[in-house]
Image (cartoon, rainbow, N blue to C red):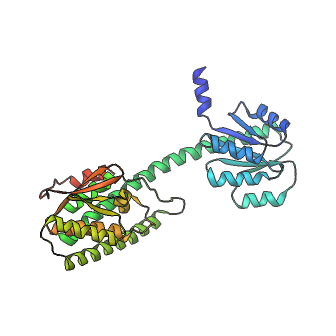
Amino acid sequence: MEEAKATEELAPAIIFVDDEATALKYFQRAIGSLAPVLTGGSVEEGKALLDQHGDRVGVLVSDQRMPREFGNELLRYASERYPHVVRILTTAYSEIDQTVEAVNLGHIHRYIKKPWDITALRMEMKQALELAVLRKERDTLVREKLGVLQKQIVATRVGLVRTLSATLIGPERFQPVETYLAAAVRAGVPNSEPDWLLQDYSDLVAAESARSGAFGHTVAAHFATLRNRHDVSNPSDALTVLAATLSDAGINVRREGDGLLWEQPAALAEFLAEPGDQAVSSGHAAWLASLLWLDGNGVALQPVRDGNTIALRPARRGSEFAADRLAMWIEQF
């Protein structure tokens, strides 16, 4: 009994919407043995059912002619918010214009004319449920694949940070990369997936290439400015320059004791976390450039989470780093 109930809860449900109470009962009686059936008497009730049960709904069947709104409006709503749901329009009237429009816009999968032939209706529902299951399996596989791609994107971005550091200050110096990645981890790197419905893989590669190139160019420009304008001999003066540089670039930081307080933690992970179609700010580029410049002046920072802020305190500069250090950081994102 419990096993049967669990199977029913896992099976995709069908939503049927019709303003005629007899039609709701008739559909429930005819189809209820195939899958759980949820019923509503209006477009608004149908939307509410979708919003409440969208994850477990596999099929949406809606009558076309109802008070105030047509059923194809409900199917449009479902197609935009719950694209995995198989959408079926049914009606006793010959409203061909609205039906053709719904088909052309991709809002419906099938059109079934009333009165129903019960055998044919059950066959249509069986096929729709099978399609819903296939869509769910496909979406799961695609989501897993895209999750792997997303991790690859972040790993590539981490590698670019290392490449920038090696290009600008030398391959043997890892400290700025260490501080940069540690600060990003303290800030938290959200999983900001690109819109996979709008971008294919080539679009993604092109966007990443353009974004990374622009970021690298801006970092190099900030680094050159810092190196040409400032030559400091102690950590306190270096932090004063760093605070002024970041503030000029639009980052909210302030001196506090012997360190700095970063008041916008999310900005520390901008390059690693944001989607590829969003340009990296000049302020974030100035942050990485400043770390490279500090390293040249023998200064290192240790980021520490302090409530809703990140404290950056002077630390001992590392001179040796394990060969797998970069891989260790990648695993944390």
Foreground residue among 71 and 302: 302
- Residue 271 % position (x, y): 36, 63
- Residue 146 % position (x, y): 45, 53
Q: Can residue 50 be seen in this snapshot?
A: yes
Residue drawn at 42 percent across, 53 percent down: 191
Residue drawn at 71 percent across, 30 percent down: 33
Q: Can residue 164 be seen in this snapshot?
A: no
Q: In which quarter of the image is residue 121?
A: top right
Residue drawn at 88 percent across, 51 percent down: 93
- How many marks can you see? 0
**Residue 302 shown left or right of residue 152 in the figure:** left
What is the quadrant of the N terminus in the image? top right
**Residue 24 shown left or right of residue 285 in the figure:** right
Residue farthest to the top, as pictured:
1
Query: In this picture, is 306 found above or below 243?
Result: above
- Residue 273 % position (x, y): 39, 58
Q: In which quarter of the image is residue 235?
A: bottom left
**Residue 50 shown left or right of residue 199 in the figure:** right
Residue farthest to the bottom, as pictured:
228
Query: In this picture, is 308 found above or below 270?
Result: above
Residue drawn at 27 percent across, 60 percent down: 180
Foreground residue among 218 and 255: 255
Foreground residue among 120 and 208: 208
- Residue 249 % position (x, y): 34, 71
Residue farthest to the front, as pictured:
257
